[in-house]
Amino acid sequence: MFPNNEEIALNIRAASERLTAAEFLMEKGLFSDTVNRAYYAMFHVANAILLTRSIIVKTHTGLITQFGQAFILTGEIDKEYGRMLANAEELQEKADYSVNSDITREQAEYVLHDAGSFLKMVKSRLKTIN
């Protein structure tokens, strides 16, 4: 049992909700918004697993860095998941802050797929940790 179990559960719920929203937005052809919600699904579930190590982050860069140090560099999680998170964050920045960002269907599908894989992996890891 971790001292942050409630916060971990809240992050997992938030991640699942964002992934559901991303899937809905994808169906509607809203690609930039799909990328945003898919990234935030990854953000919240990454926060959840970081909390198992009592790591609290305040920035997107901090999240990616801490996730990499705690799980990728140690070999506990495959480095492909670190790339997924970093790529999603980069596209989310483009989607949210560039008025002429032309996020394509393919890019949105890619990030949405990665978000689903990322959530599945972290949820599976959390079951073995708890």
Image (cartoon, rainbow, N blue to C red):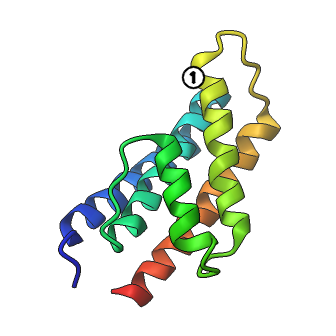
Query: In the image, residue 52 lies at what x, y percent?
Result: 34, 74
The image quadrant of residue 128 is bottom left
Query: In the image, residue 33 lies at what x, y percent?
Result: 57, 29
* Residue 28 as seen in the image, left or right of residue 62: right
Q: Nearer the viewer, residue 91 or 106?
A: 91
Residues packed near mark 1 inside 10 Å, few (<14), some (14 to 19) or many (20 plus): few
- Say above or below: 53 vs 68: below
* Residue 21 as seen in the image, left or right of residue 86: left
Q: Amino acid at mark 1?
A: Asp
Q: Quadrant of the N terminus?
A: bottom left
Residue 67 visible to an observer of this rendering: yes
The image quadrant of residue 13 is bottom left
Q: Nearer the viewer, residue 66 or 100?
A: 66
Residue 26 visible to an observer of this rendering: no
Q: Residue at x 75, y 48 (%)?
A: 110
Q: Residue at x 60, y 78 (%)?
A: 74
Query: In the image, residue 64 lies at what x, y percent?
Result: 55, 52
Q: Quadrant of the C terminus?
A: bottom left
In the picture of the structure, the residue carrying the numbered disc 1 is 96
The image quadrant of residue 84 is bottom right
- Say above or below: 75 vs 21: below
The mark total stands at: 1
* Residue 69 as seen in the image, left or right of residue 27: left
Q: Nearer the viewer, residue 56 or 115?
A: 56
List the single residue furthest toward the top.
99
- Asked which secondary structure carries label 1, the reply is helix
Q: Residue at x 52, y 62 (%)?
A: 67
- Say above or below: 130 vs 40: below
- Say above or below: 75 vs 119: below
